[in-house]
Image (cartoon, rainbow, N blue to C red):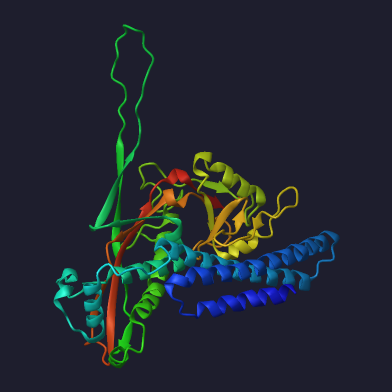
Amino acid sequence: MALALIAHAMAAHAAQAHQDVPRGIVSVHADTEVKALIEGLNTAFAAFKTEHSKHLDDVKQGTADALQALKVDNINADIAKLQAAVDETNAKMIAVQMNGGAAGQLKDKEYSAAFSAHFTKGEVQAALNKGQATEGGYLAPVEWDRTITDRLIISSPMRALCAVQTISTNGFSKLFNNRGATSGWVGEAAVRPETGTPTFGSLAYNTGELYANPAATQQMLDDSAINLEAWLAAEVDAEFAYQEGVAFLSGNGANKPNGLLTYITGGANAAAHPWGDIKTVKSGDAAKLTAEGLIDLVTALPSAYSAGAKFTMNRNTQAAVRKLKDGQGNYLWQPSFQGGVPATLLGYGIAEVAGMPDVAANSKPVMFGDFKRGYLIVDRTGVRVLRDPFSNKPYVNFYTTKRVGGGLLNPDVLKALTVAA
């Protein structure tokens, strides 16, 4: 029965993923899909707890069975797939909600129509001059830009986790109050000497250029064999999401964002922020995670920042976390129980970020905190598209760029777990 529910949930998700559903009813389909996924997920987790407990009992009695251990690992892998599907569906629902659940009225019909004509046949109309640049590129219509951004939210979890600021210049600089004001007690007629004055520090968030270069034959464009908006978004989001995912975590700042992991104690940018680095907590074991270490990680974050806090880790780390119990034998990890709600660890949500390190000695596989207040992504306004019918005949290439940057916003709201005793 459990396996049947799991298979049914995964099949429903796969079918949904291949449907071209109008934006206005995506939320209805997503809600139905997520319910089926959650049912399969909770059934799988119940089976996992039973089989894992049996395996632990066998280990204690010295009768450990390799087949039993394999069974536990297989169920754990199924849980990972189901939870990932739930998270993906939740992200789709968030993306739809950001745009009011519907495509809505085009903000600039004339420009959108002119751009589509140029995209298809290379016809340049007067309405296009608002996006004209000296290199021959044109700003994509608002609807295209929004579509690509929506897909990036689904594909790149850092965008859903962190703060995003749209800018209209090459870079963005933010001032930070280092405080330093002092005060004192005085009598009624005593002299009031000058007290300490606050100082300020700054941090620059420069942008790098992210690009994709999809191609289509001129015949495909002439015959309208493809949905241009959907095709461009699908081509661009995969490349952008991959590059962003790496850069937002480990980017070195050279024509790309400074990655979050580089601001942790010992990282390349540990001294870059005026308020210091992201502090670490030891796991309690030289080679693995422990329940005590995760509890220490949560406790290390000041309670003032815990309301919006989440864990980030990759799928392999989640598999290890699922096997951890507290002192009363309760599993620390709990699956999603309703749509829009992530899996939890010690009562806090978990975001799966593929680029996070695996569990290994001295690695930092888990971060915890309020990422909305901790890391800032900056987007230079607009996606730009350069139509190139000459370089790759018979294909027409669409050189698509978006300028993106990122950096640490507040080190105090984030903590990292180091695998160490």
Q: Nearer the viewer, residue 416 or 234?
A: 234
The image position of residue 131, as x and y in percent, is 19, 70
Q: Nearer the viewer, residue 324 or 376?
A: 376
| Residue lying at 45% horizontally and 43% vertically, measured from the top left | 412
The image position of residue 390, as x and y in percent, is 21, 87
Image side of residue 352 versus residue 42, left or right:
left
Q: Is residue 42 visible?
A: yes
Hey, which quadrant is residue 164 in on the image? bottom left
The image position of residue 364, as x and y in percent, is 53, 55
Q: Residue furthest top?
A: 189
Number of numbered discs: 0
| Residue lying at 84% horizontally and 63% vertically, measured from the top left | 62
Image side of residue 402 versus residue 21, left or right:
left
The image position of residue 226, as x and y in percent, is 36, 86
Q: Nearer the viewer, residue 29 or 250?
A: 29
| Residue lying at 49% horizontally and 43% vertically, measured from the top left | 305
Hey, which quadrant is residue 100 in on the image? bottom left
| Residue lying at 29% horizontally and 71% vertically, measured from the top left | 401
Q: Is residue 358 above or below residue 275?
A: below
Q: Is residue 363 visible?
A: no
Q: Is the N terminus in the top left, top right, bottom left or bottom right quadrant?
A: bottom right
Image side of residue 245 versus residue 53, left or right:
left
